[in-house]
Amino acid sequence: MVQTMYTLCMRRPLICANWKMHLPPAGWDAKDSPYRPEAGIDVVVFPPHGYIKHCIDAKLTVGGQCARPETAGAFTGDMSMAMLKELGCTYVLCGHSERRKYHSETDDFAAEQVIAALEAGLHPIVCVGEQKKDRDIGKAEHIVEQQLSLLKNYHQSITIAYEPIWAIGTGLNALPDDAQEVHAFMRRLLLEDIRTSVRIIYGGSVTGMNAKDFLSHPDIDGLLVGSCSLEPKHFHEIINAANTLS
Ligand code: 13P
């Protein structure tokens, strides 16, 4: 019954390519590149900051991998949300686990980023997810609940990305059934009037082989892809999987 309701609400699939600190892959701007917008799904590329302008000029839909919440200031090496917007970005990642790990970003900081992103007119994709040790003691849901609770006034304006930390860059993806369970749990945390409209996407060792399995689950509305997004052939397979199911 619940499943039918979610299926009927038709959240548009969102497939994201997070290139992290890598050069854009060969052929990224070709006419038939898999990074281009598609009719039935949203395809968004997150290049390193220095390549954002190239991607915008090539007419891709682009997001920033990060930005600070302040509007200006002495923050060497950083950009503001408004600067991303000015470049032509539509989306921004907030709270990615690599930012948390290498730049000590916190849940509070991610919440500030979300507010700043919305003020700048960007759509925030907020990354949440547990460590292996938390999953092992059954605390995955507790962790994501905590991470989302700071954002409860903004749930209607964000996309949630469930990225279990142990699955990122390890080749050990979450089992799609397990990811579905966490997604359904997070969806139940949303207020009823927005429950069927907020997109919740999965990230962590997504490949052309497992993409379809993830996307076939009712609460998995898209994918945030790292390593495989750097391989146009594999990313194409992921886009094809999304197209088949959309
Ligand atoms: P991988 O696909 O390499 O596991 O990276 C996932 C990720 O961090 C996307 O943001």
Image (cartoon, rainbow, N blue to C red):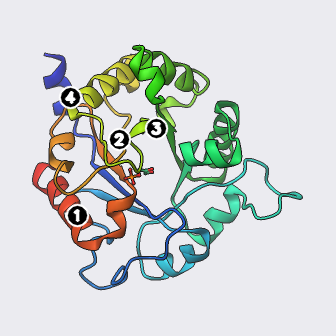
Where disc 3 sits, the SS reads helix
Residues at marks 1 and 3 touching, judged by CB atoms closer than 8 Å: no
The residues tagged by marks 2 and 3 sit, at their Cα atoms, a distance apart of 14 Å
Q: Which residue is mark 1?
A: 39
Instruction: Give the x, y percent position of residue 101.
Output: 62, 43
Q: Which residue is mark 4?
A: 177
User: How many marks overall?
Assistant: 4
Which residue sits at x=42%, y=35%? 164
Work out which residue is located at the far left of the displayed protein and give it.
Answer: 244
Where disc 4 sits, the SS reads helix
User: Mark 2 against mark 4, which lies toward the viewer?
Assistant: 4
Q: Earlier in the sequence, mark 1 or mark 3?
A: 1
Which residue sits at x=26%, y=31%? 219
Q: Which residue is mark 3?
A: 165
Q: Mark 2 vs ligand 1: CB under 8 Å?
A: no
Label 2 packing within 10 angstroms: few (<14), some (14-19), many (20+)? many
Say which amino acid is labelled 2: Ile
Res. 161 visible in picture: no
Instruction: Give the x, y percent position of residue 156.
Output: 47, 32
Q: Quadrant of residue 178?
A: top left
Q: Which residue is mark 2?
A: 201
